[in-house]
């Protein structure tokens, strides 16, 4: 179980996560509403961890409470590779720093892990929607705005990388 049809894809061009996109995600996923209504339960918190993950061949990380949630090795390898860009020497280990698991009102379960590697911080969240009809609705509410943000981000990036951007074309 776990990540099936929406497994991690390292070929996907992700949009940059910033304060605005993060809070948009909180609003559209309804987790903020659950917290405001007092429906959020903290299932587990493990802070100040220093767990080094196997270099080059990381293991799958499973939820301690929500047994079917997992973070596949591809995600850890992505963090390792992304954090090592431009580093000539030994790239270092991915270190698990903090782990949180939440239940949002009985309809959404989340495992949140904080990693570091080469002074770069990464946040990984895996979630499960408990109700299929609600899952479809939340999926539409979350995926459409995220798709729009990703498209806008790619257009901005393409425009910034295009040497002819901003020049008028002559007829």
Image (spheres, grey):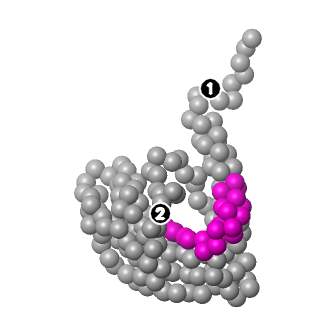
Task: State which quadrant residue 71 falls in.
Answer: bottom left
Q: Using the image, determine if residue 105 lies above or below residue 129.
A: below
Q: Earlier in the sequence, mark 2 or mark 1?
A: 2
- Left/right placement of residue 42 relative to residue 63 reads right
CA distance for labels 2 and 1: 41 Å
- Left/right placement of residue 161 relative to residue 28 reads left
x and y, in percent, of residue 125 in the image: 52, 69
Q: Are marks 2 and 1 in contact (CB under 8 Å)?
A: no
Q: Is residue 5 or residue 22 the one in the foreground?
A: 5
Looking at the image, can residue 23 be seen? no
Per the picture, the main secondary structure of the magenta-coloured stretch is helix
Task: State which quadrant residue 109 falls in.
Answer: bottom right
Residue numbers of the magenta segment:
124-145
**Residue with the most extreme top position:** 171
Q: Is residue 142 or residue 168 the one in the foreground?
A: 142
- Mark nearest the camera among 2 and 1 is 2
- Label 1: which secondary element: loop
Q: Using the image, determine if residue 79 lies above or below residue 43.
A: above
Point out the image quarter for the C terminus.
top right
Q: Residue at x 63, y 36 (%)?
A: 159
- Left/right placement of residue 136 relative to residue 88 reads right
x and y, in percent, of residue 140 in the image: 70, 59
Q: Residue at x 35, y 68 (%)?
A: 60
Q: Using the image, determine if residue 129 lies above or below residue 85.
A: below
Give me the disc on residue 164.
1
Is 4 part of what is drawn in magenta?
no
x and y, in percent, of residue 89 in the image: 25, 54
Q: Residue at x 65, y 30 (%)?
A: 165
Q: Which residue is mark 2?
A: 3
- Label 2: which secondary element: loop
């Amino acid at each position: 179980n776990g990540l099936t049809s929406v497994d991690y894809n390292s070929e996907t061009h992700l949009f940059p996560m910033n304060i605005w996109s993060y809070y948009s995600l909180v609003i559209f996923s309804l987790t903020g509403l659950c917290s405001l209504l007092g429906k959020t339960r903290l299932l587990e918190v493990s802070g100040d961890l220093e767990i080094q993950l196997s270099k080059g061949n990381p293991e799958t990380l499973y939820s301690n409470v929500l047994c079917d949630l997992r973070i596949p090795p591809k995600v850890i390898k992505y963090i390792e590779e992304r954090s090592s860009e431009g580093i000539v020497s030994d790239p270092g280990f991915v270190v698990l720093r903090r782990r949180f698991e939440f239940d949002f009102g009985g309809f959404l379960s989340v495992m949140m892990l904080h990693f570091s590697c080469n002074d770069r911080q990464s946040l990984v969240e895996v979630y499960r929607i408990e109700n299929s009809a609600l899952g479809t609705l939340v999926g539409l509410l979350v995926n459409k705005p995220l798709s729009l943000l990703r498209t806008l981000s790619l257009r901005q990036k393409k425009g910034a990388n295009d040497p002819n951007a901003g020049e008028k074309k002559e007829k």
